[in-house]
């Protein structure tokens, strides 16, 4: 992040590999190996976020971008607009947010939740 006297500049990594959603639609499905690799990267990313007490709250294939077009490209978690950073471990949240097609059932039931 850079700022001048009148502007704020946010510099981000270029993710030229597109969305996970686009890859699934174009391929039809992932092989077991591709799914395992993507899931491992996603879970490692979520573990890192949770270690910082950050809850994404809008995980979906459209918010997962590949760093480039190679089959072994890194998977990047994006769009932190609904994310929440807790001030203490296991902080309870009650706000219902996220994309309706992907929202967790407990949020629809208005059950308090944590980053887990």
Image (tube, rainbow, N blue to C red):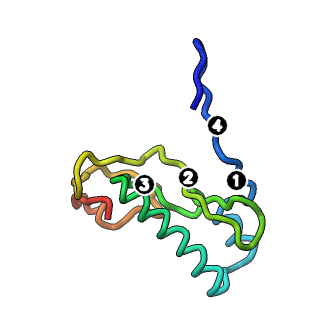
Tell me the distance, in whole angstroms, between the alpha carbons under discs 4 and 2: 14 Å
Q: For label 3, count other residues whose C-alpha is less than 10 Å away and answer few (under 14), some (14-19) or many (20+).
A: many
Q: Position of residue 72 (x, y in %)?
A: 71, 72
* 51 w.r.t. 11: above or below: below
* 5 w.r.t. 14: above or below: above
Q: The N terminus lies in which quarter of the figure?
A: top right
Q: Secondary structure at mark 2?
A: loop
Q: Which residue is mark 1?
A: 15
The image quarter containing residue 112 is bottom left
Label pair 2/1, CB-CB below 8 angstroms: yes
Q: Which residue is mark 3?
A: 56
Along the viewing direction, whichever of 101 and 71 lies nearer the viewer: 71
Label pair 4/2, CB-CB below 8 angstroms: no
Q: Secondary structure at mark 3?
A: loop
Answer left or right for 87 relative to 48: left
Answer left or right for 50 relative to 44: left
Q: Position of residue 15 (x, y in %)?
A: 70, 53
Return the disc, 3 or 4, that comes first in the chain's sequence.
Answer: 4
Tell me the distance, in whole angstroms, between the alpha carbons under discs 3 and 4: 20 Å
Q: For label 1, count other residues whose C-alpha is less than 10 Å away and answer few (under 14), some (14-19) or many (20+).
A: some
Q: Position of residue 46 (x, y in %)?
A: 44, 63
Q: For label 2, count other residues whose C-alpha is less than 10 Å away and answer few (under 14), some (14-19) or many (20+).
A: some
Residue in view at x 62 percent, y 87 percent? 32
Q: Which residue is mark 2?
A: 78
Tell me the distance, in whole angstroms, between the alpha carbons under discs 2 and 3: 9 Å
Q: Position of residue 100 (x, y in %)?
A: 44, 58
The image quarter containing residue 115 is bottom left
Tell me the distance, in whole angstroms, between the alpha carbons under discs 1 and 3: 19 Å
Q: Which residue is mark 4?
A: 11
Q: Secondary structure at mark 4?
A: loop
Label pair 1/4, CB-CB below 8 angstroms: no
């Amino acid at each position: 992040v850079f700022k001048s006297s009148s502007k704020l500049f946010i510099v981000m990594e270029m993710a030229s590999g597109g969305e996970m959603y686009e890859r699934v639609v174009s391929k039809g499905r992932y092989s077991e190996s591709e799914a395992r690799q993507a899931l491992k990267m996603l879970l490692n990313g979520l573990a890192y976020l949770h270690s910082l007490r950050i809850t994404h709250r809008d995980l979906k294939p459209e918010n997962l971008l590949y760093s480039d077009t190679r089959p072994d490209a890194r998977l990047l978690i994006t769009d932190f607009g609904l994310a929440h950073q807790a001030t203490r471990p296991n902080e309870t949240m009650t706000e219902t947010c996220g994309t309706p097609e992907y929202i967790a059932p407990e949020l629809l039931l208005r059950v308090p939740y944590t980053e887990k």
